Amino acid sequence: MLLLGLDLGTSSIKASVVDGATGQLVASAQYPETENTIDSPEAGWAEQDPEMWWNCVQQAILRCNDSGKYNPKEIRAIGIAYQMHGLVMVDRNLSVLRPSIIWCDSRAVAIGNKAFDAIGQSKCLTHLLNSPGNFTASKLAWVKENEPKVYGSVYKIMLPGDFVGMKLTGSITTSNSALSEGIFWDFQTNDVSEDILSYYGFPKTILPEIKPVFSNHGELSSSIADLLGLKAGIPLTYKAGDQPNNALSLNVLDPGEVAATAGTSGVIYSVSDQVSFDPQSRVNTFAHVNHQLNNQNRLGTLLCINGTGILNRWVRDNVAAGMSYGAMNQHAASVTAGAEGLHILPFGNGAERVLSNQTIGSIFSGINFNVHTSAHIIRAAQEGIAFSLKYGMDIMAENGTKPAVIRAGKANMFLSDVFSQALVNVTGVAVELYDTDGSKGAALGAGIGVNYFSTPKEAFSNMEKIGIIEPEQALSAQYQEVYAGWAAVLGEALK
């Protein structure tokens, strides 16, 4: 059986076709080749046009089809992974009402903090497992407060993957996992949060129909099937946020298993069977893709650093004189660990949850015009990204997450030996690398949803480990010293 997976990233959309029988990739394509922009009409805002995503989805699928490696009519199920926490609003004609307020937008922080106090911090944490923060529900409240005409025209709100699912099928659905990432889900009642709806004044009808993550979320419409060269009626059988999906793609499904990714943002994602929370909401707990499957709790604790790959891209565009990422990685490796005293904090992409929603910006510390070159800046940026993940992992450890190993796809920042070695040696945790990515995981998720696989674990029986990076005693000691200097800079910034 051929399975189609879509990964709706911030920078681009990737489509992959996977052979369910072997678990192997048949073809993949990405669109656009250059990275999509994030619009920022005001400081701290971040928006993208959902119709841009839809155009990129179409182009990625058509490019995949043009590979000639398979018959598009033989695709039997579709899965979607998507950038989390975004807000999409449509009217009764299913027309988009305004640009999506995406995951790294900071405008709703104060609104969420006010809700946290009004509903009650204890109740929020025990029921929502998070502060409302600047997640989707608070973004919708911002629209209600600041754009009442737009809000008055809303028929349904959606997460980004729900929107693309609607474009494919005409059906508007969501899941408990999606609603939990938007802070609409009550883990005590196992239903939509009445506290959030009541406090913000949202009608429940504004939400999509709720279905299990692995289930039929609609069938491909005839008009879209003709447009994409696919067979009408193909079911959409899986939708999940990019980080739960990344964990799925790495077969991270059971308590104690940990996944990582380092694309536009950087994430450590740990699975637990405990309904728990961080008292300060610096790391966040959501329903994992298999939560309540067979009546078992599966929660994902997510550490997110907004400014990881986006810092690396900024350095490429503004410091590295048009180098490829591969050339940048080699250039960074030409200088020693610690970048000769240069420290970079990667917090220049909005409010950071790990910093209690503070916006401190990216900070360059210790730069010496007579010593430091572009190679030092690249290295310090990549080390700073690794150190920010270490900082967050220490918070996760306070809440019981102490991984023995982290699984990651060999992609994005994990293509850099500088970044990978810094992460492994500063945390003391080995990283296993696998030949997978979000679109492949979404395709296999579709196979689970259409019951091609009897269990989620079966879908990953052919998953290939391509390497492991383990801590080295001498490097670990060196990186601990460098990290201490970096952490001191962060400490000063947070005062």
Image (cartoon, helix red, strand yellow):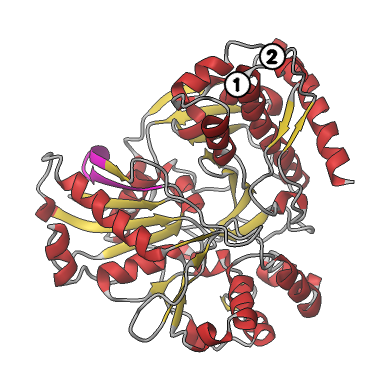
Amino acid type, mark 1: Gln
Q: Main secondary structure of the magenta part?
A: strand
> Which residue was labeled with disc 1?
421
The kind of secondary structure element at disc 1 is: helix
In the picture, measured across the screen, residue 39 lies left or right of residue 6, that is: right
Report the front residue among 436 and 373. Answer: 373
When the figure is inspected, residue 288 is found, relative to residue 183, above or below; the finding is above
Query: Is residue 453 highlighted in magenta?
Result: no
In the picture, measured across the screen, residue 99 lies left or right of residue 402, that is: left
Residue 451 image position (x, y, % from top left):
27, 59
When the figure is inspected, residue 30 is found, relative to residue 322, above or below; the finding is below
Task: Estimate how packed mark 1 is, as few (under 14), some (14 to 19) or many (20 or more) residues with alpha carbons within 10 Å.
Answer: many
Residue 152 image position (x, y, % from top left):
52, 89
Residue numbers of the magenta segment = 12-28
Report the front residue among 342 and 187. Answer: 342
Amino acid type, mark 2: Leu
The kind of secondary structure element at disc 2 is: helix
Which residue appears at 70% of the width and 32% of the height?
387
> Which residue was labeled with disc 2?
475
Residue 475 image position (x, y, % from top left):
69, 14
Q: CA distance from mark 2 to mark 1?
A: 8 Å
Which residue appears at 74% of the width and 18% of the height?
369
Tell which circle, 2 or 1, labels the residue nearer the N-terminal end: 1
Report whether residue 217 is seen: no
Report whether residue 388 is seen: yes
Task: Estimate how packed mark 2 is, as few (under 14), some (14 to 19) or many (20 or more) residues with alpha carbons within 10 Å.
Answer: some
How many numbered markers are drawn?
Answer: 2
Q: Are marks 2 and 1 in contact (CB under 8 Å)?
A: yes
